[in-house]
């Protein structure tokens, strides 16, 4: 089956702003595929190149090299406008327009017929909980409300592909849950979602595929289950008055409690086995539990960011 | 609906609510009262003084508004990321610029019409008004402002906010002295200076040729053929500047 989005060797450089320094490479041969009907989290630290990738996909920035295919067709100037919806990071739009005026204008630009547009706007305003500010100027709306208006404009024309740049940033927990639910509903509708986020617990709840960027390099691209199970983690609960020096290594995480017990987490099975032997051999130590732990997306993400990228 | 007119409609709705307009109207009202006060101490033909001062003020204010509103609107749209959601909905980028040009031209045209209407009432109150020449001068002023909008649109694509304002104002001022610049070159023996002044004469929009304000209070009407010629020149200037603007915008990375 052809992927909905196929990005091949995407390379991008931007001018540094200094005449004598030329340009700086921000994306290096990025390749990933997105299958139709799922949700993909596009992750990376600040400055990794997430927003730049989105802007290339939208046709806002011209790439230096590489190809972008949408539904099997190569896209030279961004994705087809009628088939995708884009929400930029922290938009604040026209401050003198109301959400109703903005969504009416953008809905018409997306080709929605006037007879259904108003109904659509009210439906989205109810789903994303901003009906109360629908006729208020955007300058008087809160950051979270504007963020939800931004999401509504991306979804109002029911696109096949939805591109969301940090859709959860600036939202309170209730707002985040509205947005999460809406994204999940859109996936159920059959839409494909690609989003970036720094709130990894939410990303983990929504996505089924993950792409991780580091300094413009693609360090992981694939199924989230594959990512989380690629390194099994373990947890040892122990009562050990003096922890051995080998536990100060970077390969384990130690969390000591007030009651004298400690939680030791790690990934290496070799270290786990050595540790269990040491605990059993030490009369002062009491082994309380040994458990297998699945990595969270956050742990996996941190692990990937520690990987050295071969920039050559 | 045509996407150009939809963008124009949104631009108009946003720009018309800009608070900068209130300040402009307050300034204009103060100016009219000042003119009226001055008129009371002048010897006869009060309406001529009000006409000259008033039309001059409308032009200066209109030009300043055109520069500030256009550049501010484009910059804000880029910073607020409204530009991204508009561009991603369009098949061709130039439609965005066309929408902006039409929307901003409509706002500033309406502003000039409003100011001229107040001015006309003021002149009619103090004495005789030549309606036809006054009308022609107002229309020419609107076209002059539209040229300035196109120039502002061009510079806002190529430079930062402050630099774009500075460059547009420079062209606005230099555009009123193109004949003088050319004459200066002709009087010089330096061929390089002659070349530069010739280039400036042909490159800069000739805003003085669009100025019909000086005679508005003195003659009943301008020749309609001359008037049409002025409007045609303005339209071709706007078209050329807009075309250049589209070429730049099409190649530009919207980062």
Image (cartoon, coloured by chain):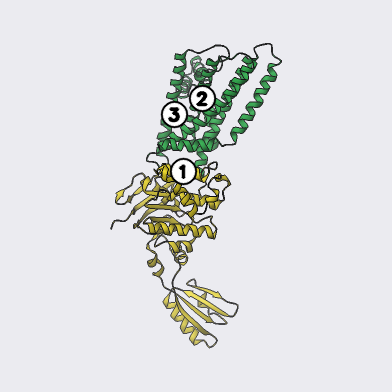
Q: Quadrant of the N terminus of chain A?
A: bottom left
Query: Picture coordinates of residue A235 (x, y %)?
Result: 48, 76
Q: Quadrant of the C terminus of chain A?
A: bottom left
Crowd band around label 2 with a 10 angstrom C-alpha radius: few (<14), some (14–19), many (20+): many
The picture places residue B64, in percent across and down from the top left corner, at 57, 29
Residue indicated by mark 3: B241
Q: In terms of secondary structure, where does tag 1 sit? A: helix
Are the residues flagged by discs 1 and 2 from a single subunit? Answer: no
- Residue that carries the numbered disc 2 in the rendered image: B142
Q: Which chain is green?
A: B
In this picture, is A215 found above or below B85?
Answer: below
> Cα distance, mark 1 to mark 2?
30 Å
In percent of the image, x 56 and y 81: which residue is there?
Answer: A242
Is residue A60 or residue B83 the one in the foreground? B83
- Determine the chain carrying the residue at label 3: B
> Is disc 2 placed on a helix, strand or loop?
helix
Tell me which numbered mark, 2 or 3, is placed earlier along the sequence. 2
């Amino acid at each position: 089956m052809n992927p909905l989005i196929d990005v091949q060797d995407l390379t991008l450089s931007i001018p540094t702003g200094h005449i004598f320094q030329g340009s700086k490479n921000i994306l290096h041969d990025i390749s990933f595929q997105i299958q139709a009907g799922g949700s993909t989290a596009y992750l990376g630290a600040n400055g990794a190149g997430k927003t730049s990738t989105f802007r290339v996909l939208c046709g806002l920035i011209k790439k230096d090299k590489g190809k972008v295919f949408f539904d099997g067709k190569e896209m030279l100037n961004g994705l087809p406008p009628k088939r995708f919806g884009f929400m930029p990071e922290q938009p604040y739009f026209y401050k003198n327009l109301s959400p109703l005026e903005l969504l009416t204008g953008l809905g018409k630009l997306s080709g929605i017929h006037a007879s259904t547009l108003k109904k659509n706007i009210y439906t989205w305003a109810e789903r994303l909980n901003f009906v109360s500010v629908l006729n208020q100027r955007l300058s008087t709306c809160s950051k979270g409300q504007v963020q939800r208006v931004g999401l509504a404009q991306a979804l109002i024309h029911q696109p096949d592909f939805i591109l969301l740049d940090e859709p959860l940033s600036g939202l309170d927990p209730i707002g985040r849950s509205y947005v999460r639910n809406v994204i999940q509903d859109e996936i159920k509708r059959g839409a494909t979602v690609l989003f970036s986020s720094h709130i990894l617990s939410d990303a983990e709840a929504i996505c089924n595929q993950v792409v991780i960027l580091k300094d413009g390099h693609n360090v992981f691209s694939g199924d989230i289950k594959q990512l989380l199970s690629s390194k099994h983690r373990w947890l040892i609960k122990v009562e050990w008055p003096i922890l051995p020096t080998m536990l100060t290594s970077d390969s384990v995480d130690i969390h000591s409690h007030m009651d004298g017990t400690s939680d030791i987490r790690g990934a290496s099975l070799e270290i786990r086995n050595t540790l269990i032997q040491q605990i059993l051999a030490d009369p002062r130590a009491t082994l309380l539990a040994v458990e297998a732990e699945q990595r969270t997306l956050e742990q996996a993400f941190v692990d990937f960011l520690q990987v050295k990228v071969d920039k050559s | 609906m045509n996407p150009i007119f939809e963008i124009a409609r949104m631009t108009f709705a946003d720009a018309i609510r800009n608070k900068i307009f209130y300040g402009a109207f307050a300034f204009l009202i103060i100016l009219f009262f000042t003119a009226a006060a001055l008129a009371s101490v002048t010897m006869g033909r009060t309406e001529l003084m009000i006409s000259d001062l008033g039309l001059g003020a409308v032009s200066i204010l209109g030009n300043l508004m055109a520069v500030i509103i256009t550049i501010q609107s484009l910059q804000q749209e880029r910073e607020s990321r409204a530009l991204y959601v508009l561009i991603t909905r369009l098949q061709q980028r130039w439609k965005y610029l066309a929408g902006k040009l039409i929307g901003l031209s409509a706002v500033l045209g309406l502003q000039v019409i409003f100011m001229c209407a107040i001015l006309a009432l003021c002149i009619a109150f103090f004495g005789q008004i030549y309606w036809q020449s006054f009308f022609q001068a107002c229309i020419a002023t609107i076209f002059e402002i539209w040229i300035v909008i196109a120039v502002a649109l061009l510079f806002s694509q190529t430079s930062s906010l402050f630099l774009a304002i500075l460059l547009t104002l420079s062209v606005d001022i230099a555009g009123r002295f193109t004949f003088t610049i050319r004459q200066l070159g002709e009087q010089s023996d330096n061929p390089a200076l002659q070349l530069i002044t010739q280039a400036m004469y042909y490159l800069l929009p000739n805003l003085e040729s669009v100025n019909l304000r000086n005679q508005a209070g003195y003659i009943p009407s301008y020749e309609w053929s001359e008037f049409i010629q002025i409007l045609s020149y303005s339209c071709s200037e706007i078209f050329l500047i807009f075309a250049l603007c589209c070429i730049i915008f099409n190649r530009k990375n919207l980062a």
